[in-house]
Amino acid sequence: MKKTIFQKISSAIYLCAVLLSASVFFNSCNDHKEPDAVKTPNINCVIINRAQIQNWVDSGWTKPGSKGKIKEVVLQFSSSAGGNTYQLIGYPGDGPASVHSTGKISLQSDTACTAKSYSKEIVLGNNILRFDNLNIINASDGSLNKFDYIRLTPEQEYPPYINFKVEVVAQGQASRSGGSTLPCPTFCGDEPNDDQ
């Protein structure tokens, strides 16, 4: 019995499909690649420069008695897709639920500081920076006192949350402590106490 051209083509396609399926099956079974190593997040020290805070002063948000006076800065982590390096964005306001979105700032990496890596579980939640703890505002008129910038150094005082040690830098030296940021949730508008 003689095969037609259609039967020959159908048989060839069927044979190719069987061979391709077998090849894919055996390759997937023999593919014992080790999983990619878990990337450890790197978190840099960051700074808020004087000019960024001067913009808040110029907006009237530091004047004594003004409506919307800055009491806190809400810090949020940000990362590019697939990245393991993070940056912080800050929003001034009088609490986590009431911020001046037009005052949004991007904190710059501090090149004098080495990024910290974490191998244990971490939570990258919002952080609250108490603005009054910085002592950078003249209480009488809301103008800026002398300083160069504010440095935030990553730490983990409330595991697994990441928070930051805060220093006010003047003339190239840490002149005073601004305390530490508080992770939010956990301390959203609240001071830590012994129960937490």
Image: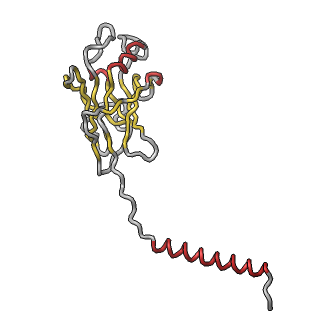
The structure residue drawn at horizontal position 33% and vertical position 50%, both measured from the top left corner, is 40
Left or right: residue 189 versus residue 134 is right
Residue projecting furthest to the bottom: 1
* Image location (x, y in percent) of residue 124: 37, 41
The structure residue drawn at horizontal position 31% and vertical position 38%, both measured from the top left corner, is 44
The structure residue drawn at horizontal position 40% and vertical position 15%, both measured from the top left corner, is 61
Left or right: residue 142 versus residue 20 is left
Residue projecting furthest to the top: 140
Chosen colour scheme: secondary structure
Residue 125 lies, with reference to residue 8, above or below; the image says above
Could you say which quadrant of the image residue 154 lies in? Answer: top left
The structure residue drawn at horizontal position 25% and vertical position 39%, both measured from the top left corner, is 114
Could you say which quadrant of the image residue 157 lies in? Answer: top left
Residues 164 and 147: in front is 147
Residue 24 lies, with reference to residue 36, above or below; the image says below
* Image location (x, y in percent) of residue 172: 21, 23
Residues 136 and 72: in front is 136
Could you say which quadrant of the image residue 185 lies in? Answer: top left
Residues 90 and 40: in front is 40
Left or right: residue 130 versus residue 30 is left
Total residue callouts: 0
Residue 154 lies, with reference to residue 22, above or below; the image says above
* Image location (x, y in percent) of residue 72: 36, 24
Q: Quadrant of the C terminus?
A: top left
Q: Quadrant of the N terminus?
A: bottom right
